[in-house]
Amino acid sequence: MRELERWRYDGKPERAVDVFAVYAGDPAALTGAGLELGYHDGEVATGAVRLADVAALEAVPGVRWLAVSARTHLLIDRSMPEIKATSVRAQAPPYSVGGAAGVTGKGVLIGILDNRLTVTHPTFTVPGVVPPKSRVIGYWDQVSRPQAGQGPPPGFLYGVWWDRTAVADVVARNRIDAIWTSSQSDHGSHVAGIAAGSGAGGDAGLPPFRLVGVAPEADIVFANSAMVPSARAASDGLQFVFGLAAQRGQPCVVNMSFGTHEGARDGSSALELAIDRLLHDGAGNPLPGRAVVVAAGNEGDLRRHGRKNISAFGTATFRLDIEPIVYPNGFTLPTDNAEDNLYLWYDGAAKLEARISPPRFNPSAWNPPGMTSTVSIAGKPVAVIAANAGPEPNGKRKIDVSLPGPVRQGQWVLELHETAGHAATVDIWVERSDIDGYPQLAYGDIAMDNTITCPNSARGVISVGNYTAEPGDPRLGEHYGEIYRSSSWGIDGAWGATPDQVRPHVVAPGRRIISASIGAPVHEDYVRGRFAGITLRRHVVETGTSQAAPHVTGTVALMFQKNPTLTYRQVRDILAATARKDQIPPEYVLPNAVWGAGKLDVAAALAATPAP
């Protein structure tokens, strides 16, 4: 509805949006109605459709649900001993430990869905081979248009597929800019280096094999899904990576260090349903040798989630602060230029009408269910309220509020009024922007729980939080072994969650992790202090659950090497049963919404992995 309202005021019916469709018929009927088909597995289809064709697509017999794709955002040297990865393999080839072969992920495919990967980085090559031999077996550039001689991967209609031969040529000839690298951040390389970097090549005065990932001999396949602001790209990327692994006869674990706040946190979003379908067979049984690891999110210390109880015929209010962002170094983002989005979910028996008051302006008219309205000031749209007419397939109702950028600064007030005579609990999530200032809920309107991003609530994923595995900064209240302040919280029994719903599942090191990246140096003083004055050029420091998740991804690759028949459920059970509990406050009952089952222990998890 939000996209349709944009069409109404910008006059662009040719605008295309990515969609998910629940449809069990002949896909030709979908393409005939205007869908540019991504894939169709017999139950769920993805693709792009012009706004002018949405009504025709919804009218196709057999289409049970059509959803606009959610927008996604980006979300080792000390951490490897911390998680005991160095006890299962040596630091350098041939990786033997005590005369026995080390466990390195060999024969396992690690999929990385992220923003970009610098395939020419030495850590993604086989050590000691000249000319360099890449461990990257393929790269799906989902952003670029094919040039002469190029094309998308088999079964898909967009992007550019660089197969193993093409990647090998790029690496052997060091054609660093041949494959799309336009993202400002080399986030994907950093993530991949943690999961599977070989440490080859060293950096500046740092010798080779000092910065080695968890699974340094695993194969790697990459898709830049995070650069496409659509969950459809992530769904397609997963479909393709698992299909490629099946063709190669390899077990496969995929890392997703990004997510979205557009979802009810009950596993019902289109992306979460698509992930679960890829992890289960037609009878609902977990498939062997498949796992998806997801970063929990970095919203734990931000005011991005709120919850209110509203009585029958009662009212509730959420306040939203749009304010400049000032970083510790004094840098300020004074203007909220990008569009902000609010997502509200509530019990389906109730009906809520909504209105919004921009800063220093009168309230808008009430917007009831089934209606979309635009709020304008001096002829300029400043807000769009879209409320679905009926409950979604999960039985809940949804309200979307969009604030087109630049967003008016000050405090916005969103009012809700229940009109059907049913009390309800209302949850609101504030979608963040990575590129400018952003909104936060006012103090008094926030809820600390359930700040995880989607797709963490998918039934089959492994959700990972972030703790501090180095000295930390006591001035900021950061200490070794403690949960990191930004690590997103999930839910647990205290909020009525069943054991299967508890998120995250486990936590791993994520503060100030040094890994591969060809980009602007970060925390240079910290790096020079760590390495006797050396300034690194091919590695940077980054912090977040984005860095915690690939520690678990690499660990799953080691477990799959030992037993490629494991299911994600068995992997999760082993990780939980072997998680460390040291320095976790004793008053915490595990698993819980902060720590999950505890801290990742690679050696214990591998020891508990049964033979096939």
Image (tube, rainbow, N blue to C red):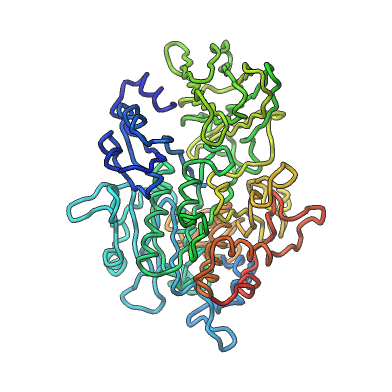
Which residue is depicted at the point 17% across and 52% down?
Answer: 148
Residue 278 occupies quadrant: bottom left
Residue 482's spot in the image, x, y percent?
Answer: 72, 55
| Residue furthest left as drawn | 148
Q: Using the image as rendered, state which of residue 269 and residue 376 is in the foreground.
A: 269
Residue 84 occupies quadrant: bottom right
Residue 212 seen by the camera = no
Which residue is depicted at the point 46% across and 38% down?
Answer: 70
Q: Using the image as rendered, state which of residue 107 and residue 565 is in the foreground.
A: 565
Q: Using the image as rendered, state which of residue 542 and residue 461 is in the foreground.
A: 461
Horizontal relation, residue 330 to residue 273: left or right: right
Horizontal relation, residue 577 to residue 135: left or right: right
Residue 481 seen by the camera = yes
Which residue is depicted at the point 30% across and 43% down?
Answer: 27
Q: Quadrant of the C terminus?
A: bottom right
Residue 18's spot in the image, x, y percent?
Answer: 37, 38
Whether 582 is drawn above or below 519: the answer is: below
Residue 86's spot in the image, x, y percent?
Answer: 59, 74
Q: Quadrant of the N terminus?
A: top left
Residue 216's spot in the image, x, y percent?
Answer: 48, 71
